[in-house]
Image: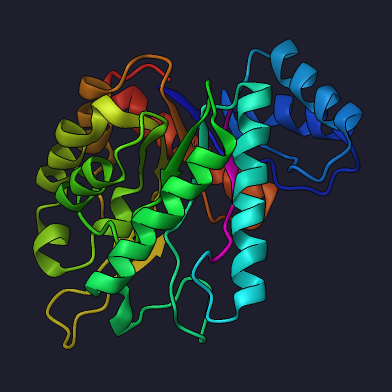
Amino acid sequence: MLLGGTISGPYAGPEEWEELLVKSHFKAVAAPFNCHTPREEIAAYVEAAKRRSVVIAEAGVWKNPMDPDPEKTAAAIAYAKGQLALADKWGIPCCVNIVGTASSVAWDAADKSNFTDETYRKIIEITRDIIDSVQPKRAFYCIEPMPWMVPDSPEAYLQLIKDVDRPQFAAHMDFVNMINCPRRFLDAEGFVEVCYRLLTPYLKSSHLKDSHMPLNKLTTTLTECSPGEGDLDFVKILKIMDRYLPADAPVLLEHMQTFDEYARAYDYVAAQAEKAGVSL
């Protein structure tokens, strides 16, 4: 697998970004540009990544295409289409977003409407519209799993792929987001195995982080954290991932805030991979 993440600044432009890229040791990264970035600047980032043999694996959307405000919904869908077109033009395999929510609390909020039949029909309609409008040939539109919205399990993801029914709709893996109950946490390795067994044929990218649940303390709390700061057995999990993923599969660390935090997470995962006999 190609371990990487997001190059967290500060940097001002492609040259400084490339310096941090070399220092990071990453082999896969999230795009440091978007569909509003000038073409010449995008080209410079892409060339820097190629020069360092690094894959730009994901173009993120991270907008709510089901916002209760119609203007915000239209803007989010337009941006998703722009990001998918950008990914297709520059050969970025995974354009990733969440399905969104009708909640007014937050763009990614837990809400009882997230699992209604009406919401599911909207998810299918919006996802098809994004893909059909862009007609990508190289890039795939993907949905990041979430604890409280579709898809919240590998089985739900398979059903979503079937229902969207578009060849350029694929899967994005974030198994920690789907570790949303004690059963999955307590048998995390078994759950990760199911995730990759079912979804690997459709996967374009994976996220990697850790999970923590205080034991025997009511009521259940599950917390995402950086690798090495939680309870997951990375030796076992990396062996599972290595068994299912091709050697060039991108796996991105995420949600750290600084370059040093990403560096610590990378070093921890690299050390666990060495123990597991897994090549990064």
Q: Residue 57 lies in magenta, yes or no?
A: yes
Res 149 seen here: no
Quarter of the rendering occupied by the N terminus: top left
Q: Name the one closer to the observer, 28 or 78.
A: 78
Above-or-below relation of 146 to 148? above
In percent of width and height, residue 32 lies at 73, 39
The answer to whether residue 75 is seen in the rendering is yes
Q: Which residue is found at the position 53% from the left and 75% from the top?
A: 67
The residue lying toward the viewer, choosing from 20 and 38, is: 38
Task: Report whether 216 appears left or right of 172.
Answer: left
The residue located at (34%, 31%) in the rendering is 203
The image quadrant of residue 190 is top left
User: Quadrant location of the C terminus?
Assistant: top left
User: Is 221 above or below relative to 189?
Assistant: below
Residue 119 image point, x, y percent: 32, 70
Residue range of the region highlighted in magenta in the rendering: 56-64
Occupied quadrant, residue 74? bottom right
Residue 94 point in image, percent of width and height: 50, 34
